[in-house]
């Protein structure tokens, strides 16, 4: 049910930026030379590392290296590497956050932290890196304690503890700040969707593209799902082509219903970074916990981002593949499915499959391995698919599907049962 405040007034479009605003925004490029300067500093630390390493090797070969000397030299090398890591985070993360997108989505070497980098994440990671560097410096003092004054040791410990406390406070504060920002962002996006969607009782009649699901309750607390990418005129046609059973959105998922639910994983998946990488997603859990809702929500999001999507239950996929094989065009069918950036296989586990059908599913998964994404929903994880799929191909299929997959477990009572028993 949509509140009056969301539908009574149109969503005001964002005015185009003025010339002064554009000029101020363009000044961000003044920071670019600073990051290239840090790249030069990175080169200095590379030279420093190999210089210290060469000194250590010569001292060890000459037989003049004591155990304390080796330990201090190794700690010095570790210190250089950790400072270089800190520089990398500042260079790449700072440029991505404050200057311009680098466009590494889908790159096989993209750092894990860069996929969700923002000022809060960057500050926390920098703080923890500084704590690590301080730890190495303090350890060097303790190893060489005979030549370290008590005054230096005391203040080194105090400063290190101050770094730890500061990092802990920063991490504690960044959580609520990020959650609040995501909540506001989701509310704005939801208002935009509701205001721009044709009203069912409007002058143009019912909205055929947004069916009203009277059997579902009002949306629960919204997930902090990132905003979809810029849509295209063909988004509606792609959504219609996908074959979704209903048009459910990620923003409408009741995140408070499942007892067990990884909010961060779904938020990360909402960015759709798994699609260009050809990775998979598996939603597993009892019936009625929202697996299909999340799968369709990701599918709709993918359609809005320009990807073609195909949705069907596992039984329907089995019929489609078996029909293609009987007609002698299974290879052509698999090649045709390459045109879809995302395939959704719903309800795995409710209908058992024989060995021949299992081989067909294996060919589908093997054909798309690391080339195209698949979302699977089911009542059990891939490790138990031998209970559903027969024959030796079951284990190989589960292995390929789960190799590059985000497995999200949901647990709780059935959403539908709760809705029926509530009497609404």
Image: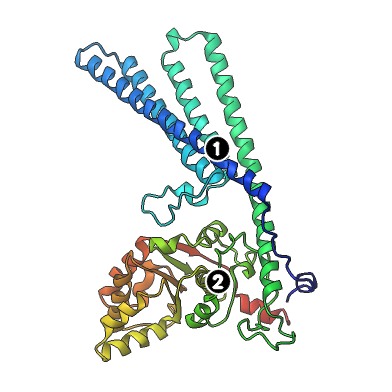
Report the front residue among 377 and 43.
43
Report the front residue among 106 and 215.
106
Report the front residue among 122 and 398.
122
- Marks 2 and 1 close (CB-CB < 8 Å): no
Q: Which residue is mark 1?
A: 30
Secondary structure category for the residue under label 2: helix
Type of colouring: rainbow
State which mark lies toward you, 2 or 1.
1
What residue is rendered at 70% in x and 87% in y?
A: 204
Q: Is residue 276 above or below residue 346?
A: above
Locate residue 118, reporting x and y percent.
Answer: 56, 47
Give the Cα separation between the discs numbered 2 and 1.
40 Å
Residue 3 occupies quadrant = bottom right
- Is 279 placed left or right of 7 in the picture? left
Can residue 231 be seen from the camera position used here?
yes
Report the front residue among 339 and 125.
339
What residue is rendered at 66% in x and 71% in y?
A: 193
Secondary structure category for the residue under label 1: helix
Locate residue 386, reporting x and y percent.
Answer: 34, 73
Q: Which residue is mark 2?
A: 297
């Amino acid at each position: 049910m949509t509140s009056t405040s969301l539908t009574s007034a149109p969503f005001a479009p964002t005015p185009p930026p003025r010339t002064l605003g554009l000029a101020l925004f363009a000044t961000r490029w003044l920071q670019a030379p600073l990051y290239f300067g840090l790249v030069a500093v990175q080169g200095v630390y590379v030279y420093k590392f190999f210089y210290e390493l060469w000194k250590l090797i010569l001292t060890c070969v000459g037989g003049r290296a004591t155990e304390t000397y080796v330990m201090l030299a190794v700690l010095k090398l570790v210190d250089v590497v950790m400072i270089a890591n800190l520089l990398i985070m500042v260079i790449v993360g700072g440029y991505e956050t404050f200057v311009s997108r680098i466009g590494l989505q889908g790159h096989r070497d993209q750092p894990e932290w860069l996929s969700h980098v923002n000022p809060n994440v960057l500050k926390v990671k920098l703080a923890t890196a500084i704590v690590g560097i301080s730890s190495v410096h303090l350890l060097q003092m303790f190893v060489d304690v005979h030549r370290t004054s008590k005054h230096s040791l005391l203040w080194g410990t105090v400063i290190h503890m101050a770094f730890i406390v500061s990092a802990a406070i920063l991490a504690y504060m960044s959580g609520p700040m990020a959650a609040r920002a995501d909540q506001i962002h989701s509310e704005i996006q939801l208002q935009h969707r509701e205001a721009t969607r044709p009203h069912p009782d409007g002058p143009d009649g019912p909205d055929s593209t947004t069916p009203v699901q009277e059997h579902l309750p009002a949306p629960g607390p919204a997930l902090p799902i990132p905003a979809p990418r810029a849509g295209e005129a063909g988004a509606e046609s792609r959504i219609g082509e996908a074959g979704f059973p209903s048009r459910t959105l990620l923003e409408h998922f009741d995140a408070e219903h499942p007892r067990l639910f990884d909010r961060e994983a779904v938020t990360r998946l909402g960015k759709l970074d798994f699609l260009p990488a050809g990775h998979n997603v598996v939603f597993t859990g009892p019936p009625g916990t929202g697996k299909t809702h999340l799968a369709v929500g990701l599918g709709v999001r993918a359609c809005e981002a320009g990807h073609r999507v195909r949705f069907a239950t596992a039984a329907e996929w089995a019929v489609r593949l078996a029909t293609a094989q009987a007609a002698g065009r299974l290879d052509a069918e698999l090649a045709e499915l390459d045109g879809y950036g995302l395939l959704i296989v719903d309800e795995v586990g409710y209908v058992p499959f024989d060995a021949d059908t299992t081989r067909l599913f294996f060919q589908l998964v093997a054909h798309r391995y690391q080339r195209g994404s698949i979302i699977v929903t089911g009542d059990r994880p891939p490790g138990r698919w031998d209970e559903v799929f027969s024959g030796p191909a079951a284990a190989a299929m589960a292995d390929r599907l789960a190799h590059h997959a985000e497995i999200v477990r949901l647990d709780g009572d059935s959403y539908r049962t709760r809705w029926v028993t509530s009497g609404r």
